[in-house]
Amino acid sequence: AAPLAGTVGEGFASLGPKTAGDRVLLVEGARYDSAFDHAAYVALLCSHMDAACAAADANRVVVVVDCRPCRGWPSPAGWSFLPLLRAILGTAPDCYPERLRTVVVFPVPYWAAMIMNTVTALLDPVTRDKIALVAGDTDVDTPCPAGVWDHVAADALPPRARCRRPP
């Protein structure tokens, strides 16, 4: 249980407010380890969503999924996330209706953007408009692509996420 808590727990961070009272939830996708149960990741995500938006307030959440690799992290291939995404999509919409402002995923290579554009075309327009894919360099220790700042204020991300550094 201890490795799961460290591996999963460090991949999420509830951050300060963005404009209009939104909360930002950073998910460091390169920390994802497919050897662990998807339910544990979903439970942790829900825990952070609960912390980010209390039932009595109207705050919405911007989920920022930073997929840049870092030395020592599992950094799985993109298709490894599909079972986890299915698990999240099977739980989160019912638990947090209308709480999601947007999901910003970066950096997305060209080939992945083509696949995601095909997949998102099948979604209803309201859901599709909540997904932002930002192209960028996928090398270790690269800064956030500039397009991220179109969706989230720079000061809403911790310094370590603005420019990836070795652990």
Image: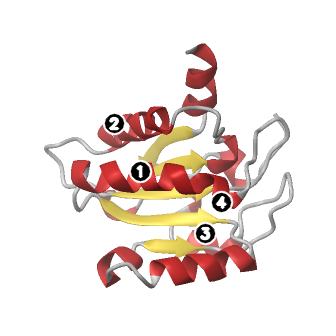
Q: Mark 4: give few (<14), some (14-19) or many (20+) Cα within 10 Å.
A: few
- Which residue is drawn at the image coordinates 62% and 78% (left, top)? 115
Residue at horizontal 42 percent and vertical 59 percent from the top = 62
Q: Nearer the observer, disc 1 or disc 4? A: 4
Say few, some or many: other residues with alpha carbon within 10 Å of mark 2 (under 14 / 14 to 19 / 20 or more).
Answer: few
Q: Nearer the viewer, mark 4 or mark 3?
A: 4
Looking at the rendered structure, the secondary structure element under dot 2 is helix
Q: Which of the two discs, 3 and 1, sits closer to the camera?
A: 1
Marks 1/4: CA distance?
A: 15 Å
Q: Residues within 10 Å of mark 3 (few under 14, many from 20)?
A: many
Percent from the top left, x then y, of residue 72? 83, 35
Q: Position of residue 48 (x, y in %)?
A: 40, 38
SS of the residue under disc 1: helix
Picture disc at residue 48: none
> How far across and how far down the image is residue 70, in percent?
80, 45
Q: Which residue is mark 3?
A: 148
* Mark 4, residue position: 79
Check disc 3 and report its element: helix, strand or loop. helix
Q: Earlier in the sequence, mark 4 or mark 3?
A: 4
Q: Position of residue 149 (x, y in %)?
A: 59, 70
